[in-house]
Image: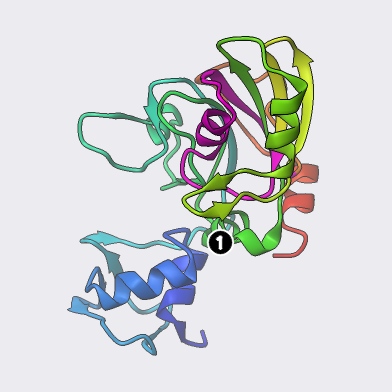
Amino acid sequence: MTPIRLQKFLSAAGVCSRREGEKHILAGDIRVNGKVARILGTKVDPKKDRVEFRGKPVIKTSRPVYIALHKPPGYVTSCKQPQERIVTSLVDIPERIFPIGRLDKASEGLIILTDDGRLHHRLSHPSFDHEKVYRVTVTRAVSNDALKQLSSGVDLDGIRTRPAKVRRISEKQFRITLQEGRNRQIRRMVGKVGHRVKRLKRVRVANIRLDKLKPGHWRHLSEVEKTVLLKDL
């Protein structure tokens, strides 16, 4: 088999994106045949070379895994965080998967998990402009003016948020569609217009919908969903 760059192998094996793989290589997290590989140009033969990530063997599976999970409140979107309940613990499969993007601990809703590093890059990078849709409940009635402010954008840390689609659901509830994902963005945006989030639920990422999936439950993506999601990968 033709040797490939180490960061490409890590991405294909679902460990991380190529860019993150480069960081892990430089940090000394990767070993090839027992030796630390710190050179970005390192190439490996997946059939002959033994690759380890932080002491654990990296094995490239033949078919990547794509899962939709309804994250309940109280879980963190991390693969490992001491003394916290993590979303990967809700999915009982042998493959080593990781969450794409984040939902803060108090929030709930759709999380996509995979072992495909390429998809992680596609859905995490802002240049792809994929949509994320949230249903937001605030503690008191929200005015039309406040919703217009959220739609046009607000300043967070000196940088204006991108325009968003906002649609009222009820007196205290609305739906917002974003094409970016800054830290605790919706909670901070809502705070900027004088409100506080009571409940935050993500209901769609790109073409994947939460629908009737119950909290703590998960499902494999359908072939149609995967085809659309991976179309430009």
Q: Residue at x 59, y 29 (%)?
A: 193
Side of 84 where 128 appears, left or right: right
Residue 77 picture location, percent across and down: 42, 37
Side of 172 where 75 appears, left or right: left
Q: Please indicate, yes or no, whether residue 50 appears anywhere in the rendered image.
A: no
Q: Secondary structure at mark 1?
A: helix
- The correct choice, above or below, for 36 with respect to 165 in the image is below
- Residue 179 falls within the magenta-colored stretch: yes
Give the image quarter of residue 225.
top right
- The correct choice, above or below, for 70 with respect to 43 in the image is above
- The correct choice, above or below, for 29 with respect to 183 in the image is below
Q: Nearer the viewer, residue 115 or 16?
A: 16
Q: Residue at x 62, y 59 (%)?
A: 126
Q: Which residue is mark 1?
A: 121
Q: Residue at x 49, y 35 (%)?
A: 103
- The correct choice, above or below, for 192 with respect to 53 in the image is above
Residue 104 picture location, percent across and down: 44, 33
Q: Nearer the viewer, residue 173 or 194?
A: 194
The amino acid marked with disc number 1 is His
Q: Nearer the viewer, residue 166 or 27?
A: 166
Please identify the quadrant where the C terminus is shown. Answer: bottom right
Give the image quarter of residue 203.
top right
Magenta-tinted stretch: 177-206
- Residue 197 falls within the magenta-colored stretch: yes
